[in-house]
Image: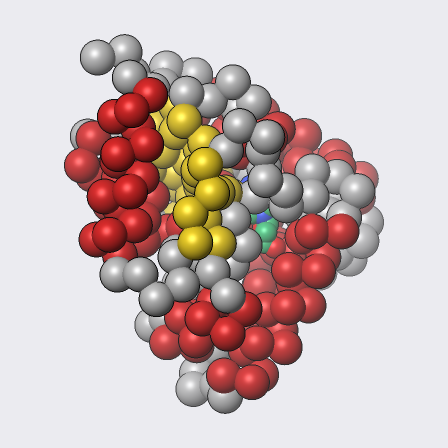
Amino acid sequence: MRPLIIAIDGPSGAGKGTVARAVAKKLGYRHVDSGAMYRAVGWKAVRDGVPLDDEEAIAALARRSRIDVTAADVSIDGADVTRAIRTPEIDRAAAAVARLPKVRTVLVEGQRQLGAGGAIVMEGRDIGTVVFPRADVKIYLDASAEERARRRAADPAHSGGPTAIADVATALSARDEIDRTRTASPLAVAADAIRIDTTSKPVDQVVAEVLAVINARI
Ligand code: DC
């Protein structure tokens, strides 16, 4: 079978990470979380005190950084930031740097290199629309706002400490708003994407639906 490029997009808490990881495992493909790359850049900008709206400075920072995203870890310039990038502060920093077109150009370039040989499941916001407009399979995962906030609040990888679901919901909808309304590659459903609503669906069922879409395409 020809090595495919599979794009999985959708808002936070739609289940992209869990589903993309399981689908990649099933196919023996590489899984890449593109959001982790924006998070790593946001983390380094905060660490170095670079203003999050200074497009030139953040793009330069992104360009000179080595970001490694593996199935298990995320590192930037050799520093393991796997846990450090999952905090409320870095949620906001990542959304801020992701608005900047020049930063996106740098990261999209890296994402295209990772996917050049296919055999990849990449998740994000613009994978099917911008990064790989000719992806073999495009999936858009969505879920109700309440369900997405519930999942995010229960996610142990998110180390913000115990947080009320209402607070998570407020922060999530603020970030969604930034992701959807920014001018550079806003979160959008690609015309040829298959949309799957994951609200109250067990992970296994969503994974099976995605695999069925992939099988139907090949
Ligand atoms: O998926 P995530 O929450 O880890 O993503 C972090 C931020 O990066 C979020 O604000 C959306 C943004 N992002 C993006 O703009 N494009 C992508 N391909 C992936 C993430």
In the image, residue 55 above or below residue 133 = below
When asked about the image quadrant of residue 122, the answer is top left
Residue at horizontal 23%, vertical 43%? 208
Q: Position of residue 179 (x, y in %)?
A: 67, 52
Q: Look at the image and tell me in which quarter the N terminus lies.
A: top left
Q: Look at the image and tell me in which quarter the C terminus lies.
A: top left
Of residues 104 and 122, the one nearer the viewer is 122
Of residues 185 and 189, the one nearer the viewer is 189
| Left or right of residue 108: residue 100 | right
In the image, residue 110 above or below residue 25 = above
Residue at horizontal 47%, vertical 77%? 160
Q: Position of residue 91 (x, y in %)?
A: 58, 63
In the image, residue 109 above or below residue 53 = above
Q: Position of residue 37 (x, y in %)?
A: 52, 44
Q: Position of residue 175 (x, y in %)?
A: 65, 63
Query: In this orientation, does residue 110 appear?
Result: no
